Amino acid sequence: MRAFVLAIIAVSLISPARAQAANDLAIADKLPLFTQNHCEQQRDPAGQLFCGDGELAAAAEKLGTAIEARLSRLPDRLPAIEENALWIRQRNLSCGIFGQTAVRTDDIDRVKTCLLRETEERAAILRDPDFDCLAANTAAGALICSDPELALAEEELNGQVLGLIGKLNPTEARFAFAEYGRWTRERDRKCDLVGKENVPLAELSSAQGCLAEYLRRKTADILGAKGDPKRVFGRQIAARLPDTDAADFCVAKIHAANSCGGFVRISRVFATGSDVEEQEAKVTADIDMVVLSPFTTCSPVASTCTGTCWDPRSGKAQPAAAARQNSRESFNVTRRLRIQRTFAFQKAADGWRCREDELAPVESGVAGGGS
């Protein structure tokens, strides 16, 4: 990435290292804390500005506090993390920061003013308790927010879930949060709301009863646990049939076990085929994910959280040996990933259980552009 930035700067015969050093010195003249805070170590232009300017740093700290307060209200934090990452991309673009291209010295004051205004406004908005509703980016979220009874029911469920998860140790809590995310995906499938973000609310009103029943049933399950989180989370759950729900059980468990929630969010799971016998089954599913934090395209994170390495140039899944030559490249935040993977199941007395030790390799994968 540094080579890309320097290629733009180095229009003369100046060496890349000298050009970068000259740019750092120019920025340091405009940012009083740049040298003291060693901001040259950050290659992200926005990061350098927030690092080197006291007013921006203070605004960023207030925003961070508002973000943490928002996340503490939500059992499923990953959609909020995705929404915040998308806002950062949009903020940078609106303020004239384009990828890793260095900000021109003459533009620093203007860009600083823009970043400060956008950051302070964002912090104020996040402190509004209604923001989570207003920021809903799914059809289910929009429907819930449009109906006061549904909104109150979801708020009660969220509070009950957070109260239970707060009693678990960090590892157990990670699995519980993954399970809550799976509940939400299952809810959207059962209520026929997947992929309907742009459908007018009036056309989705028939799903309100389904959402109300989901919220009622899950709240009743939690109240029935009488304060014991292990009666709700962490159980070995079997699927009724080897289908999309069954594949989603596997996906959620794998991602929780590998701490993938810090890097990717599962946005959709959809079974595309199955091979079912009396006691065994295989289910092939498409899994859509969103990158929440950058990770190298051929790395332990890539292999454990997406099941494959990636060719960053073609955006296709690749065996590790083929992709390793580009292993220093990373996915950008909000990048969309889709893989196709086959899961093996064994029939038990209570249903179909995922056999994680027999997961087939990823058959295919494609990385799309960020939003």
Image (cartoon, rainbow, N blue to C red):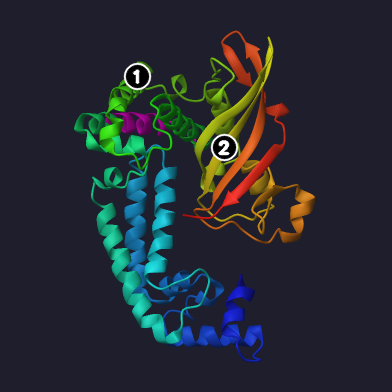
> In terms of image quadrants, where is residue 241?
top right
Distance between the alpha carbons at the discs numbered 1 and 2: 27 Å
Q: Which residues are magenta?
A: 156-169
- Which secondary structure is most common in the magenta stretch? helix
Residue 321 colored in magenta in the image? no
Graded by Cα atoms within 10 Å as few (under 14), some (14 to 19) or many (20 or more), the crowding at tag 2 reads many
Specify the farthest residue to the left: 148
Residue 26 is situated, as x and y percent measured from the top left of the image, at 48, 87
Work out whether 139 lies above or below 128.
above
Between 28 and 144, the one lying in front of the other is 144
Res. 38 in view: no
Residue 195 is situated, as x and y percent measured from the top left of the image, at 43, 38
Work out whether 75 lies above or below 281.
below
Judge from the rendering whether residue 129 lies leftward or rightward of residue 220; answer left or right: left
Between 349 and 175, the one lying in front of the other is 349
Residue under numbered circle 2? 287
Q: Measuring 26% from the left and 55% from the top, which residue is drawn there?
A: 125
Work out whether 73 lies above or below 57.
above
Graded by Cα atoms within 10 Å as few (under 14), some (14 to 19) or many (20 or more), the crowding at tag 1 reads few
Between 85 and 269, the one lying in front of the other is 269
The numbered dot on residue 217 is 1
